[in-house]
Image: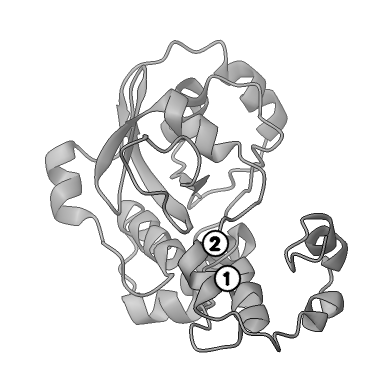
């Protein structure tokens, strides 16, 4: 996102990004990020938190409650029956559109955003591509499937995650909430994932009963995908 217009010349700029030599580009130094970053402001609110960090980087002083209201984070329905719980999990958090519109509303048009899909995998050198936009005043948020490329000794996370980027160098990307430095090759795997979510077994079994009604799935706009994935386990 940017306090200018990041859409201008987007196609040509994406092509030229590959020709730029990757050098360290930092919005904040690491010490600054430790002081300035905003950490998770609520359940499923990593998107709203990322927007807050963007606004912090762009020097907009807007209260967290205002940003949260503008982003309109959706929550998990943890106490709902299984079918309703699964539906809530499929939309919990915030989409890229909610983040862009939320930032625009919170700043009354002072910040505008542009979404770039990375699935199927975009054929770019990620750090060079990010550095290209950052040099032009943009602040990036990456939406990643954290269930991809999980180390064998780690538990698989149960959600995707939005993180604001405050720096890049040749092979690493610097992110907030949590503050971490991650190899760009790993980030790109998570960034280029299909829109799928794994649900933990115990979360299913805790809500499963003989009378579970899955007919609610047929009312969803994307019900054919739910059937294709056999979410109800009927095939």
Q: Which residue is mark 1?
A: 89
Closer to the eye: label 2 or 1: 2
Label whose residue precedes the other's in the sequence (2 or 1): 1
In which quadrant is the C terminus drawn? bottom right
- Whether residue 61 is situated above or below residue 127 in the rendered picture: below
Q: Nearer the viewer, residue 138 or 177?
A: 177
- Left or right: residue 176 compared with residue 230: left
On residue 49, which mark appears? Answer: none
Asked whether the beta carbons under mark 2 and mark 1 sit within 8 Å of each other, the answer is yes
Q: Residue at x 46, y 58 (%)?
A: 158
Q: Residue at x 37, y 35 (%)?
A: 152
The type of colouring in the image is: one colour
Q: Which residue is mark 2?
A: 199
Q: Position of residue 26 (x, y in %)?
A: 29, 33
Q: Nearer the viewer, residue 144 or 27?
A: 144
Q: Residue at x 61, y 40 (%)?
A: 193
Asked which secondary structure carries label 1, the reply is: helix
């Amino acid at each position: 996102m940017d306090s200018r217009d990041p859409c201008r010349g987007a196609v040509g700029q994406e092509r030229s990004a590959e020709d730029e030599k990757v050098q360290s580009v930092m919005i904040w130094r690491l010490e600054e990020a430790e002081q300035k970053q905003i950490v998770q402001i609520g359940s499923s609110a990593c998107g709203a938190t990322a927007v807050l960090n963007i606004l912090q980087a762009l020097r907009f002083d807007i209260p967290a409650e205002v940003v949260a209201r503008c982003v309109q984070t959706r929550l998990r329905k943890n106490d709902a029956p299984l079918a309703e719980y699964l539906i809530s999990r499929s939309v919990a958090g915030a989409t890229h559109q909610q983040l862009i519109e939320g930032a625009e509303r919170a700043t009354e048009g002072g910040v505008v955003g542009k979404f770039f899909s990375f699935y199927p995998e975009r054929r770019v050198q990620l750090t060079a591509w990010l550095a290209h936009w950052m040099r032009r005043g943009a602040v990036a948020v990456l939406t990643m499937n954290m269930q991809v490329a999980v180390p064998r000794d780690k538990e698989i996370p149960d959600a995707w995650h939005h993180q604001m980027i405050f720096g890049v160098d040749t092979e690493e990307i610097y992110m907030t909430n949590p503050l971490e430095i991650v190899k760009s090759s790993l980030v790109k795997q998570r960034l280029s994932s299909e829109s799928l979510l794994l649900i933990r077994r115990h979360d299913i079994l805790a809500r499963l009963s003989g009378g579970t009604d899955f007919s609610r799935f047929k009312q969803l706009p994307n019900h054919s995908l739910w059937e294709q994935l056999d979410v109800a386990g009927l095939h």
